[in-house]
């Protein structure tokens, strides 16, 4: 049998070995780069798109960051659901008893039943409150009337608020992660999820839960962008549409346009870039407001893009001796209260401006009073929730405990947020990515403070600030924990270094002593 010997295998030359080694090194680097790229890709999945698109959610949720976020959102959502189901049992009774809650519910109910937006006092067409929130309630109530959903206004309102409030936790995480990092984002989400007044707000007919959601959506659209390049026209148009809806709920978010202009200037380093970003958003915003403006022009023969209650809000606390708090706009420094709302609105606006010009010292005295009244405490939301028309009450001891917890949680959080303001401002101009995002958040926070202070000292006006206070407080907490961790890790290394130095010194002394002894023995031997 013929034996077939294997063909001799020639040894690779040095050049071939070198080429193969280079190829292996290149492949290994490519694999490591792919892993790093995958990690970076996972990092970028935490975007607004990741929340909306199912495929990206599937990629983000299984990660460790995704699991942490799911836990926070689940806890916050369950707390809001439990409170909403308990607190929302009935609808408001009358505006004299339930205040603005009755107004929002009434207008939503009228819209759902096709009767339009009319005053419950005169029956005439009105535009006193911004239409966004009543219109949203009207859509939800209409679904209760025309779909299998229950026609229970209290339950429908609670369900709407639970969805919006729980989603707001997610949006807070996204914004904080883009402005700072994941750790700040997850701490922000926990602070938001456990915030007592934000949980109690689900059990009201008030506008704050909806406005907070709309404001966070607008800010998230902006900070989600990669600011190393100009924002696309499509994103600017989407932001303008979201901002228009938010302004129709409550117009306090309008200054965010200044933040967008600042970010646009930073990315292009030119006024042309700033105006491009501002222009597309402003045009879209105007288009969103146009239908309501046309309706008001037809009904009132006046230019009213949002509402007619601005004049009353400006005038009510502006009179000599005012403490900056609520007062009916019926004093001598306001216009005739019997004027129709479309005429009273500009008249009271002019009256407020005239008061500021004629009494500048009084205005300066009232500004801090309005601010401190707005920021004084956070227990008002619980009172609103218990006064929503459901006729619920808590034992006095429990009620007092919840009030105290609400206030303490709020005060500790905003004190921590003061440090977060410093961290927000630190190095923002030198960071091409996070710098524009921080400018947007800073301008938003400033607007949510300045506009309410220009009106009157309403404690409810600080509620939309709470998500941003949570982010800034989380930044402080993250900074403190990192400093503590760094101190703990540096202490053992310092002690081990000292021990190594001490041991080395002692060994040198022993060696030196032995050498000295050897030289001494040698000299003695020679002398003998």
Image (tube, helix red, strand yellow):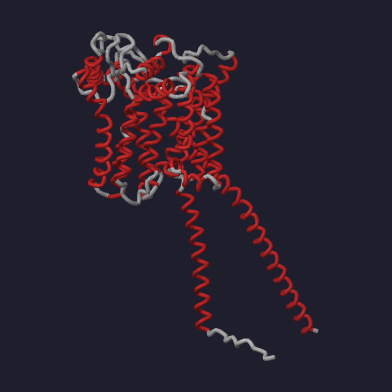
Q: Position of residue 392 (x, y in %)?
A: 53, 13
In the image, residue 473 sits, relative to residue 271, either above or below, namely above
The residue positioned 27% from the left and 49% from the top of the image is 269
The residue positioned 45% from the left and 41% from the top of the image is 51
User: Which is nearer the eye, 130 or 54?
Assistant: 54
Q: Position of residue 469 (x, y in %)?
A: 45, 33
User: Which is nearer the eye, 139 or 350?
Assistant: 139
Q: Position of residue 370 (x, y in %)?
A: 37, 21
Is 88 left, or right, of 453 in this rendering?
right
Judged from this view, the residue extending furthest toward the bottom is 2
Q: Quadrant of the C terminus?
A: bottom right
Is 115 left, or right, of 75 in this rendering?
left
Q: Quadrant of the N terminus?
A: bottom right
Judged from this view, the residue extending furthest toward the right is 528
Residue 419 visible at all: no
Judged from this view, the residue extending furthest toward the front is 1
Quarter location, residue 501: bottom right
């Amino acid at each position: 049998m013929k034996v077939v010997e294997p063909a001799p295998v020639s040894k690779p030359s040095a050049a071939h070995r070198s080429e193969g080694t280079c190829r292996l090194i290149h492949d290994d680097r490519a694999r490591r780069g792919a892993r790093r790229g995958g990690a970076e890709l996972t990092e970028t999945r935490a975007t607004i798109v990741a929340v909306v698109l199912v495929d990206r959610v599937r990629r983000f949720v299984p990660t460790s960051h995704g699991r942490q976020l799911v836990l926070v959102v689940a806890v916050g959502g369950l707390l809001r659901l439990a409170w909403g189901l308990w607190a929302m049992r009935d609808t408001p009774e009358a505006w004299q008893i339930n205040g603005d809650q009755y107004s929002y519910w009434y207008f939503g109910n009228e819209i759902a039943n096709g009767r339009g937006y009319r005053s419950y006092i005169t029956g005439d067409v009105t535009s006193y409150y911004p239409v966004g929130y009543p219109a949203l309630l009207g859509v939800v109530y209409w679904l209760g009337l025309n779909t299998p959903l229950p026609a229970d206004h209290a339950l429908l309102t609670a369900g709407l608020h639970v969805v919006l409030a729980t989603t707001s936790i997610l949006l807070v995480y996204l914004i904080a992660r883009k402005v700072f990092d994941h750790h700040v984002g997850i701490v922000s989400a926990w602070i938001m999820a456990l915030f007592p007044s934000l949980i109690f707000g689900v059990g009201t007919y008030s506008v704050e839960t909806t406005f907070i959601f709309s404001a966070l959506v607008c800010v998230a659209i902006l900070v989600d962008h990669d600011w190393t390049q100009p924002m696309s026209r499509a994103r600017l148009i989407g932001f303008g549409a979201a901002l228009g809806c938010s302004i129709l709920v409550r117009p306090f978010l309008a200054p965010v346009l200044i933040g967008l202009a600042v970010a646009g200037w930073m990315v292009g380093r030119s006024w042309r870039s700033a105006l491009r970003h501002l222009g597309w958003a402003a045009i879209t915003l105007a288009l969103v407001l146009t239908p309501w403006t046309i309706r008001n022009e037809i009904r009132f023969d006046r230019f009213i893009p949002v509402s007619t209650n601005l004049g009353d809000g400006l005038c009510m606390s502006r009179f000599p001796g005012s403490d900056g708090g609520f007062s009916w706009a019926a004093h001598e420094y306001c216009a005739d209260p019997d004027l129709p709302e479309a005429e009273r609105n500009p008249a009271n606006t002019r009256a407020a401006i005239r008061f500021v010009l004629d009494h500048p010292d009084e205005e300066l005295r009232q500004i801090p009073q309005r601010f401190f009244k707005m920021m004084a405490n956070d227990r008002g939301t619980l009172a609103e929730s218990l006064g929503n028309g459901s006729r619920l009450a808590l034992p006095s001891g429990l009620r007092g405990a919840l009030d105290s917890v609400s206030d303490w949680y709020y005060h500790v959080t905003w004190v921590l947020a003061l440090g977060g303001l410093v961290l927000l401002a630190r190095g923002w101009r030198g960071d091409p990515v996070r710098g524009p995002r921080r400018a947007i958040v800073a301008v938003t926070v400033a607007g949510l403070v300045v506009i309410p202070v220009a009106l009157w000292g309403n404690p409810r006006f600080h509620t939309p600030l709470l998500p941003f206070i949570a982010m800034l407080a989380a930044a402080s907490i993250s900074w403190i924990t990192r400093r503590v961790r760094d101190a703990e890790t540096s202490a053992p290394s310092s002690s081990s270094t000292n021990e190594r130095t001490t041991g080395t010194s002692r060994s040198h002394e022993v060696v030196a002593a032995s050498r000295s002894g050897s030289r001494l023995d040698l000299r003695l031997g020679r002398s003998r």
